[in-house]
Amino acid sequence: SGRDGEKYVDWQRQRFSVAIPPAPPGQLRYETVSNVKLEPGTYEIRVAIRHEQAGDVGSVHTYVDVPDFDSEPFPLSGVVLHDASAPTATPAEALGGVIEVAPTTPREFTSGLRIVALVRAYQLRQDQGGPVAVTFRVLDHQLREVSAEPITLSADRFQADGSAEARFDLPLGRLQPGAFVLRVEATRDTSTARREVPFTVR
């Protein structure tokens, strides 16, 4: 337990080494991943990092909602963005088989990057075996649609755990600099689930 009745439900410690070039151009950026098992609910995630030689310390925190998929009529994961060119200090295997790629944390991209968005739809009940229609939409800062791509997840694409994955390449090369929203809508029969991620192109 922490201050003011806070309760720590899980924690991890990682140590990793990174190669620093002799003359780094600007700031160095590395990403690390971790896998935390949580029950459904709302949590505050705190991350602190310390450079062992220099003694420099930094920290960040955010809030996450872990949905109760068993109670939802049509579970849909959050949106994961993947940047294959991002320097990852820990391998994707650190996610324990939850996902094959390491998510990227930045939400500001240049037009030359290839950023892949992915979501997972779940069908957890025996009577849910139909196809799922997934649409990836890119909206501008006024929420006007500038790009859309529909994908159909047929019943045979769902794995033994009831999940199927849909992927979409953000059309960064066709977007003008500015703020955008990636909206993902998944529909099965009369049930629809939606997820959104804001991002910026510079």
Image: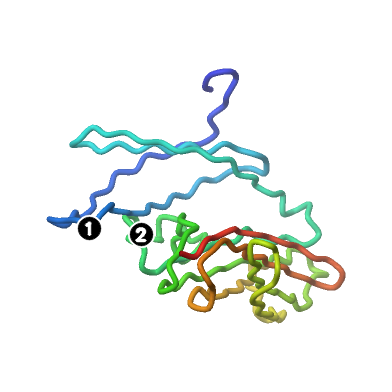
* Residue placed most toward the observer, 160 or 103: 103
Q: Please give the residue where the numbered disc 1 appears in the rendered image.
A: 25
Vertical relation: 90 (above or below) 172:
above
Numbered tag placed on residue 91 in the rendering:
2
Query: Residue 102, image x and y in percent?
Result: 44, 61
Which amino acid type corresponds to the residue marked 2 in the rendered image?
Answer: Pro
Q: How is the image coloured?
A: rainbow
Q: Do the residues labelled 2 and 1 touch (CB within 8 Å)?
A: no
Which amino acid type corresponds to the residue marked 1 in the rendered image?
Answer: Pro
* Mark found first going from the N terminus, 2 or 1: 1
Q: Which picture quadrant has residue 134?
A: bottom right
Query: Label 2 neighbourhood size at 10 Å, few (<14), some (14-19), many (20+)?
Result: some
* Residue placed most toward the observer, 142 or 9: 142
Query: Label 1 neighbourhood size at 10 Å, few (<14), some (14-19), many (20+)?
Result: few
Using the numbered discs, state the Cα–Cα distance from disc 2 to disc 1 in whole angstroms.
24 Å
Query: Residue 199, image x and y in percent?
Result: 55, 60
Query: Residue 97, image x and y in percent?
Result: 48, 61
Vertical relation: 199 (above or below) 17:
below
Residue 146 lies left or right of residue 96; in this view the side is right
* Residue placed most toward the observer, 162 or 53: 53
Residue 127 lies left or right of residue 18; in this view the side is right
Residue positioned 25% across, 38% down in the render: 51
Residue positioned 74% across, 75% down in the render: 132
Q: What element carries label 1?
A: loop
Query: Residue 156, image x and y in percent?
Result: 68, 81
Name of the residue lying farthest toward the top:
4
* Residue placed most toward the observer, 128 or 194: 194
Name of the residue lying farthest toward the left:
22
Q: Is mark 2 on a helix, strand or loop?
A: loop
